Amino acid sequence: FPFDRQEALQLAVDQKVKMSISGVQPKLGAQLSLKNRCFEITQKGGSYILKPDNPHSPHVPANEAATMHIAGLAGMAKPLSGMIYDRNRQLIYFVKRFDRVGKGKRAVEDFGQLLGLSRAKKYDASMEDLARVVKKYASFPAIELSRLYALVLLNFLLGNEDGHVKNFSLITDAKGVVRLSPVYDLVNTTILAAGNAPVMEETALPLHGRKKGLTRLDFEEYLGQKVMGLSPKAVGSIGRNLEQALMRGANFIHAESFLSAEMKLKYLFVMGMRRLRLGFHAPLPEGEFMGYLYPEEKDRLCFARLETLGMNLVFSPVREMEKYQDKLVKVTVSSGETRIALHRD
């Protein structure tokens, strides 16, 4: 990308009033030039969106790139996306627009439009409303409800507390089939919260009238089975798929993502706690970790907490863990096996 970050941010300000994309993060419309081997800024017809790092809310581009990658690991339809370098070798997030086909457009309507809600009221709905939209407008509701359930569950597991109605859309293909659009704007917003303020909400939209303290029963029996009409077998299959995907996702965050070391630990902590709350197996990523080990029980959850580099990692308890309580240990995860040993200088 032949600009630096400050130039990119200024270009985003200049473009904002002229483009058909919105949101709080700075964005740029762009076209990929194969001839010049770079992205070129365009006012109209751009098939890509670029998101530079914003000094007022740093880490978001790398966060979105990582979160979208995990969605792909879970088998969700997603547009081509990733990170590129700008002129000063700082990273910028890019994503291909799925509402563009050549020089034409695909019909895409977000759930806010379908519910008759303005942008200012994008939080004035519920997860039950999401299901009602799919039942009313999708060509094959049963298929799309399964996809919607997986996406809602993934948002919770990855700490995306900003999944409002405009972050869900229906798209109409060339044959006139209406289905859920590819996923977009997936970010672990939990780790972006400033300071250590107590969590007031865990989801953008309420489920069963609540935005916090949701349980496995809320998602599986109420949302999946009662509201969406999915079978217990289908709900269980979706859960197991996400459980396996998040294990691979944790390895990706730890070893391959572009997040800073601090943000990686925060991301892994959120993933660990959310998986444990839903009864999923939550091992640490592959590798070695050093810290003080504390077997804990909270809100009827049993887990291990490893205090490392001034932050916490959590994982499913393992055998004979109690004998290492309050001690400096080395935790090694290899081929799915977790081993704990006292640290010795």
Image (cartoon, rainbow, N blue to C red):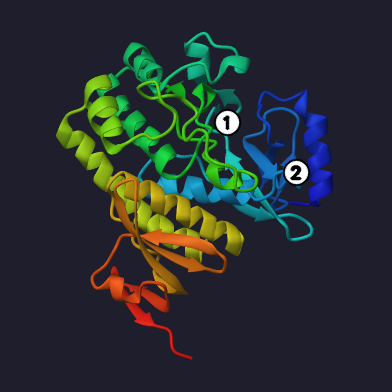
Give the numbered dot on residue 249.
none
Q: In the picture, residue 316 is in which quadrant? A: bottom left
Instruction: Verify CB contact (< 8 Å) between mark 1 and mark 2.
Output: no
Q: Is residue 15 visible?
A: yes
Q: Residue at x 27, y 42 (%)?
A: 239
Q: Amino acid at mark 1?
A: Gly
56 up-or-down from 286: above or below: above
**Residue 56: numbered disc:** 2
Question: Residue at position x 56%, y 48% from top?
Answer: 191
Q: Kindly report which numbered mark, 1 or 2, lies closer to the viewer in this rendering.
A: 2
Q: Outermost residue, bottom direction?
A: 345
Disc 2 residue crowd, few under 14, some 14–19, many 20+, Cα 10 Å: few
The front one of 336 and 161 is: 161
Residue 115 coordinates in the image, percent (x, y): 47, 11
- Classify 149 as above or below 306: above
User: Considering depth in this image, is 294 or 78 the residue closer to the camera?
Assistant: 294
The image quarter in which residue 262 lies: bottom right
* 300 over 118 or under it: above or below: below
Q: Secondary structure at mark 1?
A: loop
Secondary structure beneath dot 2 equals loop
Q: Which mark, residue 102?
A: 1
* Closest to the observer, 126 or 300: 300
Q: Is residue 121 left or right of residue 336?
A: right
Q: Residue 140 appears at what percent x and percent y?
A: 28, 20
Q: Would residue 143 be seen by someone viewing this image from the given angle?
A: no
Earlier sequence position, callout 1 versus callout 2: 2
